[in-house]
Structures are given as structure tokens and as C-alpha cells.
Amino acid sequence: MAGLDFAKGLSVAWQVPLLGVNHMQAHALTPRLVNALNATDQTSKQLTPAFPFLSLLVSGGHTMLVHSRSLCDHEIIANTTDIAIGDMIDKCARDILPPPYLASAKDVMYGKLLETFVFPQQPSRYDYTPPSSFTRTRTSTDPTHDWVINPPYQAPGNQGSIGHAHSFTYSGIGSSTRRVLERKPDMDYGERQSLARVAMEVAFEHLASRVLFALDRPDIKNIKALVVSGGVASNHYLKEILRQNLNANGYGSDQIELLFPPPQFCTDNAAMIAWTGMEMYEAGWRTKLDALVTRKWAIDPRCSDGGILGLDGWKNVKS
């Protein structure tokens, strides 16, 4: 409330327009910001990615697959039914990482710590092969490690992954990991690395499975890019797993381009908000001074609140 009132005051005092920005819309448009920053006189005429494209928004608070049709039309294809992927990874990191490793950390970016723990030196190529089935139980590459991590929705048919094509779930992966550690509290360093890697693989393959379901839908056409943004998008192993699974299912880099913003633009940042405000401004949108604060603001116009433009307080000076 205080922030909106202050912005309204600045709008009046400086005689400049007020423009509200949806945070999730801003994540989806971040690659267009990056494209503009890197543009030259020859490449500045067309922003990329052009609509339509798919957006995978992955952070500590969100796990959402979106069909971005236009500036203000973002259909939610799949959403988390419990916790977000970033939240799950953070919890796994706190459970798996040895106490001395955690104590020596310079920050509490647990997801990054877990990735560095598994891959101390980022490899140029990962030893990874896409699974034949996303519902296959995962084990360690070391046969002496007597544990498994079960992927979500293992039941066959409509009771399993196919019937939940519009859902993500991550609480089960975290719970499975914790149970392994409760059973083996003295697990050594190498086995902890293996457990962390398998947990990440299952989590990232779950993302890939929903992307592939979406790409196979007959009503989703002309998709040339998958935008991956949010804090988890900075994970290099996620990039590898998405690319490999797309390739293995007939969506090579010549068909679907993977777009990951630079790390500084993956997490919440002011630049993405400013950029989205500029795109909305150039499309003619303005926020009226009588606009009110809302606790939740969907990006999908099919949601009950009407999405980005569903809230009261918008006007378009070009219409």
C-alpha cells in the first residue's frame, strides 16, 4: 500500500505516467530485455523471442509453465500443486550438504551451493542420458548405494503422469531425499554428492516432461523458443537436462531455442520490471491513479481475476 501510494505521489509530482507491472510477466519478458541490451543497429528492429513462446518460470516461490501468446496473454499450462522447485532444492541442500560444507559457505544461496557441491568444477559436458521414461525410479550410479528416488506421478495412465500433465509436484522428491538421509545419517561425502545429483535430475526431468507434454499439444503451435527464468534458471545442470530431453524427443536446437537470461537477470531484479513497464507503455497501457492494491495478480486472462488486464485501473491511450 505504501509503495503504491508513493508511486502515485511521484506520478503526480513529476507529471509522468503510472504503470503497474506484473512480476511474473516481467520474468517471462526478461529474454526480450537481454535481446534489446545486446542489439545493434542491424538487429534492433525485431525483439526476440517473438510471440508465441513457452515460458518456464522456476524459483523459490513459483514453478509454472506458461504459453506466452502476446504481451498480456500468458496461459498457465502447468503449475505446482504444492511447493516450488526452488524451495525443494533449498531444502534438499540443507539436508544433504555436510555441516562443514554449509558452515564454510559465504552465502545462503542453497541451490547454487548444491550445484557446486555436485559439480565442483563445472564440466564442459555432463555424463547424462535422458530417461526412457520420466516415471522410472532413479538410483545412484554406484550399485553400493542402496536407495532410490521416485519421480512424481509414477502410477500408469491417467492416474499418473499423463493424467497430471498440467501439474508439477515437488514435495515428494524432497521427502524421499530426507528419508534416505534419516536412514543413513552417516552417509559419506561421495554418496551425498550422488544423492544430490539424482534429486536434481528427477526434479529437472519433471520440468522437462511438462514442457514436452505442452509441445505435443495440437493447440500449441509455432513455438520456436522456451524461455527459462527465475532463480533456478541459473543452474547449469538444468540447462543440460532440458536441452538433452528436448533433443531426444525431436525438438532439436534448430526447432526449439532454449533462452536463459544471464544470472543477474534470473532472480527478481529492477531491470526486468522497468523493461516490462516500457513494453506496456509502448503498447499504450497506463495505470489510473485510482488503482488499488491487490494481494494476488494472475498473468493468465483465463483466471478468475482476468489476468494482467483484468484488474480495475487500466486505460489504453492508443485505443
Image (cartoon, rainbow, N blue to C red):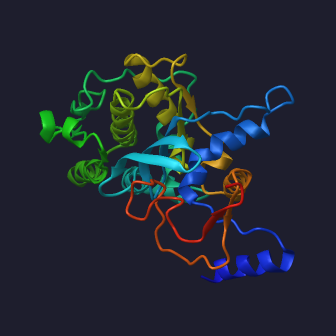
Q: Nearer the viewer, residue 30 or 122?
A: 30
| Residue 262 % position (x, y) | 66, 41
Number of numbered markers? 0
Residue with the most extreme front position: 319
Indicate left or right for 241 with 2 as reference.
left
The residue located at (67%, 54%) in the rendering is 280
| Residue 131 % position (x, y) | 30, 24
The residue located at (33%, 32%) in the rendering is 213
Query: Would you say residue 97 is visible in this rendering?
Result: no
Query: Would you say residue 99 is visible in this rendering?
Result: yes
Q: Nearer the viewer, residue 124 or 85?
A: 85
Indicate left or right for 33 with 210 as reference.
right
Residue 43 sits above or below residue 265 on the image: above
Quadrant, the C terminus: bottom right
Quadrant, the N terminus: bottom right
In the picture, residue 148 is in which quadrant? top left
Indicate left or right for 148 with 64 as reference.
left
| Residue 291 % position (x, y) | 60, 76
The residue located at (57%, 36%) in the rendering is 51
| Residue 10 % position (x, y) | 79, 77
Q: Nearer the viewer, residue 214 or 136?
A: 214
